Image: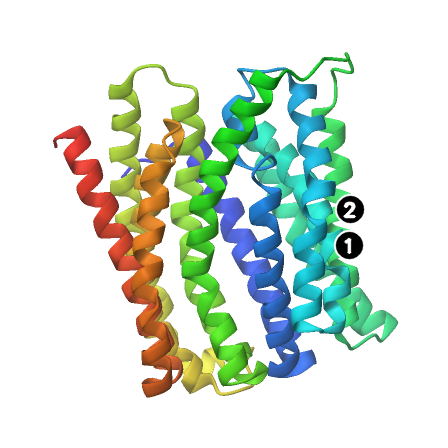
């Protein structure tokens, strides 16, 4: 099936990002151990929770309003919101988990929020090339800094990862600022403008927030019940399996950008149908290839309990396939400014994910994998029938 230049470019970039992220996972796992990797996974999960609030005015609402409002109004509002809103959840999560890495949570969240806002400008402008460049540069800087800190400086602790985050987000933020800031005119922020930005952002992030709970709720359960070591193994299995999502995310980024810039509903449906077909075919191929990788090959880069990780991957891959297709359906409704459908989808998935409490106690990590699979599948089914009813295909 033929794919556009933008989709191909995004797919290549995200493939590169997936490789780099895998290198980060393997490097931290082998140098810091499963316990250290588990603590990093917990930190990243908490960071994602903070970013739910941050992205209310720094996420997709920026892309949605780029051509509707003054750029400097959007940016100033987003930056101020990020600085203020990240304080409370960061303090709460620092108190709850009390890991040394969590004292950096607020500052990393702010840098991430600033960078996210700038990236959404590029999405709204259909400037996919700059978006992709910075998207690839950030994890590349993480792994480069990590290698330097571990093998040159000799810092073989979790602090090497923290420093890498500061370096990567700091640099890509400054570069993105150079690309974005060209209009320095002073504009007032009316109540109408603020309400529009907030309404779309809040609706979208409620959906993202519940979706995050679908994805990472089990991380907390595993951490509390089975410990950081087991969470480290599970996070590695999830990271490897979800690398397949680069296909869906590559296609959906372009789909979302196209929908935002299209006027006719029939064109939006056409690009969505094409995106669904491409995502389904290429995701199945990627999953088959991934699962056919022998354990001894994976064992070259994964030194701990490879059999457990491979078994988890087999179960997780089923849910990842349905999640890939669900991304495309969800982006169709998001592109129309209709966030309620995605909120409902995420809530359904989360309710069924609660089964994880019971499956985890009975089947351990396999139960956690089954729980994720059920959550992903139920969300997919809901959006499938909703979309089918809307377009009557």
Residue 126 can be seen in this image: no
Q: Which residue is mark 2?
A: 170
Q: Position of residue 221 (x, y in %)?
A: 47, 75
Q: Residue 72: which numbered mark, if any? A: none
Q: Secondary structure at mark 2?
A: helix
Q: Residue at x 51, y 48 (%)?
A: 14
Q: Considering the image in quadrants, where does the N terminus appear?
A: top left
| Nearest to the observer: residue 309 or residue 40 | 40
Residue 90 falls in which quadrant of the image?
bottom right
Above/below status of 82 relative to 199: below
Residue 63 appears in the rendering:
yes
Q: Are marks 1 and 2 in contact (CB under 8 Å)?
A: yes
x%, y% of residue 107? 76, 52
- Quadrant location of the C terminus in the rendered image: top left
Left or right of 184? Residue 330 is left
Is residue 46 positioned above or below 204 on the image?
below
Residue under label 1, please give it: 166
Say whether residue 17 is left or right of residue 180. left
Measuring from the top left, give residue 152's x and y in whole percent. Answer: 85, 70
Task: Name the element at disc 1.
Answer: helix
Q: Residues within 10 Å of mark 1 (few under 14, many from 20)?
A: some
Q: Residue furthest left?
A: 393
């Amino acid at each position: 099936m033929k794919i556009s230049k933008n989709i191909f470019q995004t797919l290549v970039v995200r493939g590169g990002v997936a490789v780099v992220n895998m290198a980060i996972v393997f490097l931290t796992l082998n140098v810091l151990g499963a316990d250290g990797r588990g603590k990093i996974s917990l930190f990243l999960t908490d960071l994602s929770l903070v970013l739910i609030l941050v992205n209310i005015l720094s996420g997709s609402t920026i892309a949605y309003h780029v051509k509707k409002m003054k750029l400097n109004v959007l940016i100033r509002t987003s930056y101020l919101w990020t600085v203020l809103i990240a304080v409370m959840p960061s303090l709460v999560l620092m108190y709850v988990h009390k890991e040394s890495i969590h004292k950096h949570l607020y500052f990393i969240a702010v840098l991430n929020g600033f960078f996210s806002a700038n990236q959404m400008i590029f999405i709204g402008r259909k400037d996919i090339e700059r978006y992709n460049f910075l998207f690839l540069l950030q994890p590349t800087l993480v792994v480069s800094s990590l290698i330097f800190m571990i093998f040159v400086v000799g810092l073989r602790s979790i602090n090497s990862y923290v420093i890498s985050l500061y370096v990567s987000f700091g640099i890509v933020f400054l570069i993105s600022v150079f690309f974005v800031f060209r209009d320095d005119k002073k504009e007032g922020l009316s109540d109408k403008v603020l309400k529009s930005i907030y309404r779309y952002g809040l609706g979208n992030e409620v959906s993202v927030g519940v979706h995050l709970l679908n994805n990472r709720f089990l991380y907390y359960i595993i951490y509390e019940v089975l410990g950081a070591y087991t969470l480290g193994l599970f996070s590695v299995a999830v990271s490897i399996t979800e690398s397949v999502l680069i296909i869906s995310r590559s296609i959906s980024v372009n789909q979302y950008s196209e929908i935002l810039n299209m006027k006719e509903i029939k064109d939006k449906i056409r690009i969505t149908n094409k995106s669904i077909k491409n995502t389904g075919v290429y995701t199945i191929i990627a999953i088959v290839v991934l699962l056919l990788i022998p354990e001894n090959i994976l064992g070259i880069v994964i030194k701990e309990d490879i059999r457990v990780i491979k078994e988890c991957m087999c179960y997780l891959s089923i849910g990842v396939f349905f999640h890939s297709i669900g991304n495309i359906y969800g982006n169709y409704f998001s592109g129309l400014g209709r966030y309620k459908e995605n909120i409902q989808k995420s809530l359904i998935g989360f309710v069924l994910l609660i089964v994880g409490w019971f499956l985890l106690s009975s089947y351990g990590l396999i139960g956690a994998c089954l729980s994720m699979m059920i959550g992903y599948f139920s969300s997919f089914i809901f959006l499938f029938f909703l979309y089918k009813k809307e377009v009557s295909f």
